[in-house]
Image (cartoon, rainbow, N blue to C red):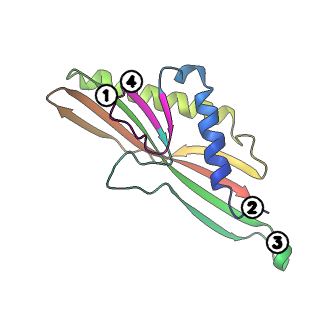
């Protein structure tokens, strides 16, 4: 029996997003990518997108019934994720629109695959979005940390 759905759900989510046609031009990363390259559009699964916050997610479990060691457990998994869109200009509106379009493609993909094909998963949904906009001498960056929430039985 699985201790948690967390690893399988993260793997299924990464696989789903990499196969989503509307995200084909976006880099999908399992965690924070290790690269010096500047990417225009990036989605990180299991990362907040901030080097100061390396939390990949949280897991909460409780017994579903009173059957002792044979009881199923209800589990809520919260996976930290992030969309980053960056441009080489100062058009904040266009960069913000692009970041939210990417978030919308993710939401559509998850809604269409609300169990991610993972046994025991009852529902997967996008929740809790934050918005960060930064301007630099060489461009604009919009970061949207968000949470993928998963309800399942283990």
In front of the other: 96 or 48: 48
**Magenta highlight range:** 27-43
| Side of 150 relative to 120 (left or right) | left
Give x and y (percent) for residue 64. 76, 69
Q: Mark 4 and mark 2: span between their CA atoms?
A: 38 Å
Q: Mark 1 and mark 4: span between their CA atoms?
A: 9 Å
Give x and y (percent) for residue 22. 55, 20
Q: Mark 2 and mark 1: span between their CA atoms?
A: 39 Å
User: Which label sits in the foreground, 1 or 4?
Assistant: 1
- Residue at which label 3 appears: 71
- Residue at which label 2 appears: 2
Label of residue 98 in the image: 4
User: Which label sits in the foreground, 4 or 2?
Assistant: 2
Label of residue 152 in the image: none
Q: SS at mark 4?
A: helix
User: Which label sits in the foreground, 3 or 1?
Assistant: 1
Q: Mark 3 and mark 4: span between their CA atoms?
A: 45 Å
Give x and y (percent) for residue 120. 77, 53
- Residue at which label 1 appears: 86
Is residue 28 magenta-colored? yes
The numbered mark, 3 or 1, whose residue comes first in the sequence reads 3
Is residue 22 magenta-colored? no
Q: SS at mark 3?
A: loop
| Side of 76 relative to 30 (left or right) | right
Please tell me how crowded label 1 is: few (under 14), some (14-19), or many (20+) other residues with Cα within 10 Å.
many
Q: SS at mark 2?
A: loop
Please tell me how crowded label 4 is: few (under 14), some (14-19), or many (20+) other residues with Cα within 10 Å.
some
User: Which label sits in the foreground, 3 or 2?
Assistant: 2
Q: Are marks 1 and 4 in contact (CB under 8 Å)?
A: no
């Amino acid at each position: 029996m699985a201790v948690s759905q967390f690893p399988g759900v993260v793997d299924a989510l990464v696989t789903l997003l990499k196969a989503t046609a509307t995200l084909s031009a976006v880099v999908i990363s399992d965690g924070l990518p290790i690269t010096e390259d500047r990417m225009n559009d990036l989605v990180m699964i299991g990362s907040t997108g901030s080097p100061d916050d390396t939390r990949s997610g949280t897991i909460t479990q409780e017994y579903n019934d009173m059957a002792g060691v044979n009881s199923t457990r209800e589990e809520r998994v919260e996976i930290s994720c992030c969309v980053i869109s960056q441009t080489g200009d100062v058009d904040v509106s266009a960069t913000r629109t692009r970041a939210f379009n990417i978030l919308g493609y993710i939401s559509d993909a998850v809604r269409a695959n609300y169990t991610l094909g993972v046994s025991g998963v009852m529902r997967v949904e996008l929740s809790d979005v934050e918005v960060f906009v930064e301007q630099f001498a060489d461009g604009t960056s919009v970061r949207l940390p968000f949470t993928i929430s998963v309800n399942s039985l283990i």
